[in-house]
Each structure stands twice: as structure tokens, then as C-alpha cells.
Image (cartoon, coloured by chain):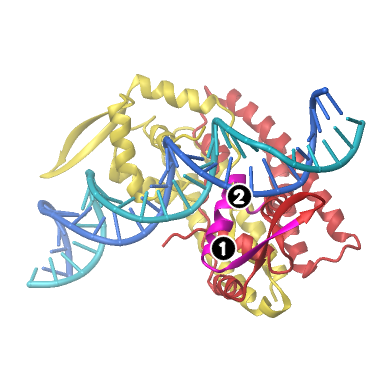
Chain colours: A yellow, B red, C cyan, D blue
Amino acid sequence: MKEKKTRYIILGLLQNQSLSGYEIREIISNSTAYFWQESDASIYPTLRLLAEEGMVASSPQFVGKRRKEVFTITEQGRNAFAEWFRRPPEVDARRQEFLLKLFFTTEETKDEMESHFKLHLRQLLTTLEALKEIEKRLQGPVEIPNKGFKMKTLKNGLAHIQLEIDWVRKNRK
Amino acid sequence: MKEKKTRYIILGLLQNQSLSGYEIREIISNSTAYFWQESDASIYPTLRLLAEEGMVASSPQFVGKRRKEVFTITEQGRNAFAEWFRRPPEVDARRQEFLLKLFFTTEETKDEMESHFKLHLRQLLTTLEALKEIEKRLQGPVEIPNKGFKMKTLKNGLAHIQLEIDWVRKNRK
DNA sequence: TGCTGCATGTAAACAGTTACATGATTAG
DNA sequence: CTAATCATGTAACTGTTTACATGCAGCA
């Protein structure tokens, strides 16, 4: 029984504030993307779907002349979110192409793998920086509801990234 | 540019040996599934596709009276695999429902999250055991081509699982 | 004038999963 | 005899991505 998970990150973000599709995209891509990604194009259709189902209500807002469609969660939406939250999280399908390539590495291809290691490390360091940025923001005086749990989520990411960096440094050569 | 990745794990497994669809399924579900999963139903159609493309050749084999369709990689298949191997691994779409729920936890829902932690821990311990089993097999005297790289892949998994277990133990309560 | 960022969307294609279906063989 | 395992498959669905498309506003 598969079911569109995109719904829940949207409903989750709408718990504490009304947001436009664009704002949701922004939040996802620079704060939750490290543990939950969505492609840009998936936001708008899902918002429309949620609106049709009565999970969110939309109303146009204007900043100057620029129109924005702002979405607010409804009581029904809150219930659907709570119902999802209670369900045990599904184990996520692991598909790590980097490890698949490592697994299939041979004496003949180990130099190619070595270059994948290099790239992997660079990407990890970039991600690490990004996460540290978020950490700074989160540690700052900003008011964020349920900061503690968001911090825990972040720390989990930081720990895995740091482990992976150490592992890469030990295993490449 | 998305492209069926299922092809490559199949081609990879066929590098050193000819296998039937069923055997491929078995290998995936009890040895690579920890970093690369495939649903059972995806194997057979992909094998047929690969056969149509000339990447694999199939020939019926009989064990007693039982028919088995055994697949062998072709030169073309080896080239396609090598070409894939050289390409930089794509960053995998992270979608960790457990973390998404942690991120959205509030004072009101923290008990529910606690029960998710419990289940998560149990699942981690099960996975840890399974990985240790594989480790034992791998450390044994069995002849496995390019053992070293397979061992590295495994150790990576073990390290992350162990980290996650420690993290869970620190963060639940 | 042209570029960047804000803002919203659609159509088509594709990958992957679920659920179902079938039958042979072997071990207890 | 019957349950488990070996063995192979398909149809339908659905979630997701890719690529494309549009237009306004502000700034240099």
C-alpha cells in the first residue's frame, strides 16, 4: 500500500504557519532535503490535490501586485497528519549507488572507484557545511516551534555525514 | 535523465557467474539489500528487457526435471556495465520517514515518537545481526571475487548501523 | 535592456511496487 | 499428503521526475 508521502511533509510544514507553494519548496530544499527530498514539480500538484480533498484551504495574497497562493491547513488536514504521524515509519528503500559501485569494484576498476571516492568526499564536505549553517541558525535566538526535535534530526544527519567522511578518508587512498 | 538502475545490479551480479532470475532475487534480498534494494517483481521484466537488448543471453537449464532460465552476460552487457561504473554515482534521494517524523515531533506527540524509536531500534538490531552474519560468511574461506571491496561495502553499512543504534540509545527515553 | 529571483504550473514519460497467478519438486 | 521452497511471470497502478512553459518585479 503505497501512498503519496509528499502530502505529509506539506501538511507538516503547514502546522505552524500558512505557506505558498514556493515557500514550501524553499523550506524543503534548504532545510529538510538532507533527510527528505521532494522534486520541485511535486509540490504544486500535491497542494492542489490536498485542496481538493479539503486538507488545506487556499487564499490569494498580494505582496504589492504580485499574487501568491497561500495555503492553510484545515482541521481535516491536521487529523490526516496526526494519523500519519502515529503510524510506524516505513523503512526507507535504501539505494546507494556509491555503495553499489564499491560493491562491484575489481582490481581493474579500482582507479575509477578512487575518483568516485574523491567526488563523494567533496559532496560530503559541502553537505557538512550546509548542515553546520543550519545548525548555527537553529542555535541562534530565532523562535522555532519544537526546536529540540528539529535539532535532534539535524544532529543525526551531522553524525552520519561525519562518520561517512571519516570512513571515506580511511578507505580511499 | 532517469534510467532503470535495476539493470546494473543484475549486470553486476552476472559478471562472475551465470544466474537465474530466482538466484538473482535471492542474492539481492540476502546480501545487497542493505544498500541496494529491488522488489522481487522487478527482476524478471528487467531480465527480459536486457535479453531483448542483447545485454544478456538466456539458456534453459535443468536440475533434475526442474527448468531454470539461466542468464549469461554478453560482451555488450559488460560494456554497458563498465560504462555505468565509470559514471559518477548519482546522489541518492534521501527519504527517511523516521527522521521526517522526528522533525515534526511536538510536546504532544513525543510519546508516539518514543514508540517509533523503540521499533526503529528493534529493526536496527535485526539488521545488525544480519550484517554480522554476512560478515562471518565473508570472513570465512569462501572464494568470492574481489572480497576486499565487498567487505568494505559491508563495513560501511555496519558502521552506520552501529552509529544509528548508539544515537537512538542516546536520544530516546 | 537584460538578468536574476519570485511564483506557478502542466504533459508526458518512466520506474517501481502491489497484488495476483501458476505450477513443479522436495522434505517431512 | 501437504507444506515449503523453487521458479517464473503479468497487469494495473501510482508516485515521481523531467522537461517545458509562462510571466511579473526589481535591480544594475
Left or right position of B145 against B9: right
Location of residue B124 (image quadrant): top right
Q: Residue at x 21, y 38 (%)?
A: A69
Q: What is the count of numbered marks?
A: 2
Q: Nearer the viewer, residue A44 or C13?
A: C13
In the picture shown, does residue B88 fall above or below A136? below
Q: Are marks 2 and 1 in contact (CB under 8 Å)?
A: no
Magenta part of the chain: B34-61
Left or right position of B152 against A40: right
In the picture shown, does residue A126 fall above or below B164? below
For marks 2 and 1, give the CA distance: 19 Å
Q: Which residue corresponds to mark 2?
A: B38
The amino acid sitting under disc 2 is Glu
Q: Nearer the viewer, residue C21 or B148?
A: C21
- Magenta includes A169? no
In the picture shown, does residue B26 fall above or below A6? below
Q: Which chain does tag 2 point to? A: B
Q: Which residue corresponds to mark 1?
A: B51
